[in-house]
Amino acid sequence: MYKDYYGLKEEPFSIAPDPQFLYMSERHREALSHLVYGMKVDGGFVLLTGEVGTGKTTICRCLLEQIPENSEIAFVFNPKLTATELLETICDELRITIPFGTGSNKAFIDALNAFLLETHSQGRKTVLIIDEAQNLQIEVLEQVRLLTNLETNKQKLLQVIILGQPELKHQLERPELRQLSQRITARYHLEPLSKDDIQAYVRHRLAIAGVERPLFPPATINKLYELSGGVPRLINLLCDRALLGAYVREEHAVSPALLTEAAGEVFGAQYNSSSTKPPVWLWTALILVCLICAGVLWQFYAGRSEQTPVAAELKLPINKSQVVKQAPVAPQSEPDFLPEPLSNEPLTWTSSEPIEKSSVLAYQALFALWGYEYRATEGAAGTQAQEFGLNLISRRGSLGRLRLLNRPAVLTLNDPEGKKFYATITALGPESATLVLGTQVRIVPTGVLNSQWFGEFTLLWQAPPEYSGVLQPGGQGALAYWLEERFAALNGRATRKLDNPVLEGQLLEELKRFQTESGLTPDGMVGTYTLILLNSRSQNKHPTLTAGSGG
């Protein structure tokens, strides 16, 4: 459901044991090494135990993709069997044919022994893997031990790998199973993931699913460790439910609070009943502290101007006197400042101004690029844009969309801790982007930007005076005549003298062809994106993102 929203190729937190999603922590690598060792040792048992959901089956499936071609594998998934049913299952897995009506233990063992001798003579190995072995009855475990007695004079013919939950370890300590326990040549107990492993685990699964940006900030990872105990299956359940919740709320990252809410849905009443609510006196104290802090902050900012001289510090072009509506401006293509060198470091808010003012500073930088001064105390950004003959739009898209529109924009970013702040993108190259962050300028690789930007942008553009809304095919009026003039100039033809121009016929075909060539959907609808790209082909000068493309 949420795959398209986050740009995922597939669900990253499915609980199915898919080997491509296997995150090889140090513990998992050791566990897999033990299984590989069990494939090479002649005979005996290899034991892998771990809590429910720690990844035992997934590791085993990963092993199956690495087995040599000369191996025969029998995989028993359901060990709640009698000794006879187990032998029959093993024979079925190895495609051993048993004559009808001879389904005794001896018949199965004789047929299995003949098969093992044949494969051994051909240089092939046979491995038996039993999952969820804690469910095996004592007499069935003893039967498994007896299977390892099938041997030649020099080596065992069958290798057995047993996977089970921790209680299997205790079961093997019973006196009646001491012979089986003594034949275990390698043991490994798979522990849950550490906190650092969880962060790498989540990042790994998201990357395999096609997303590199951090949907789970560090604070959320800490909460995830607390709620899951490091058990991968619980991590998958919680992350999947939390991403669904974030999608429903149109959020681009999972907060600790949202993850906690997801835990209540996953674990149900047991989780809710075990959670303790803070006492009333604590809530009261917190409210009082918040009120005091709010009062202090209000007094601090009351005596200060809402206008921060960011444009002056960056020497961005400012035209304080130019407020004539509909008058196109010719701002500098590149502001006169020296940015920092290209850096792979994450984008963080390091300005002396509080992060809450990042939006004000970002809009100041955006308006300055158009030659105007944005004042936070004089109304909303959209209202001020209209006073200068400009339009302000907010959309969601990608760097490809920004490169297509080719206009500076205010971006909504998230720092590594998940805190939201705003920056102005002023240049966009094939592999790097230039951004104004408060009073600093950063040049970063596009990969760094993509990891912290979830597609929200706001930009300025200049609509034609005739524009009053989207013009659809068959529509008529002043905007249709404006289009006639524009496409006549673009296509080198004479403007047709039309009493009542309509968006149809030749004009509609020219519009659709332009949309196709510009990378837009050729739907014949004249909206914001179409008009922005038409402006880019006009004689008016506008600030741009890509070098050499102004006007």
Image (tube, rainbow, N blue to C red):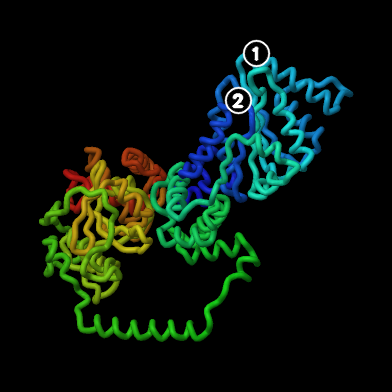
Please count the marks in the image.
Answer: 2
> Does 487 appear above or below 129?
below
- Residue type highlighted by circle 1: Ser
Residue nearest the observer in this picture, 474 or 338: 338
Is residue 488 among the parts visible in the rendering?
Answer: no
Query: The residue tagged with tag 1: helix, strand or loop?
Result: helix
- Residue type highlighted by circle 2: Asp
Residue at (41% x, 48% y) in the render = 473
Q: Which residue is mark 1?
A: 121
Residue at (86% x, 27% y) in the render = 104
Residue 24 left/right relative to 100: left
Residue at (26% x, 85% y) in the render = 299
Residue 37, given in percent of the width and then of the height, sits at 54, 31
Residue nearest the observer in this picture, 167 or 253: 167
Q: Which residue is mark 2?
A: 42
Residue nearest the observer in this picture, 417 or 187: 187
Residue 265, given in percent of the width and then of the height, sits at 60, 62
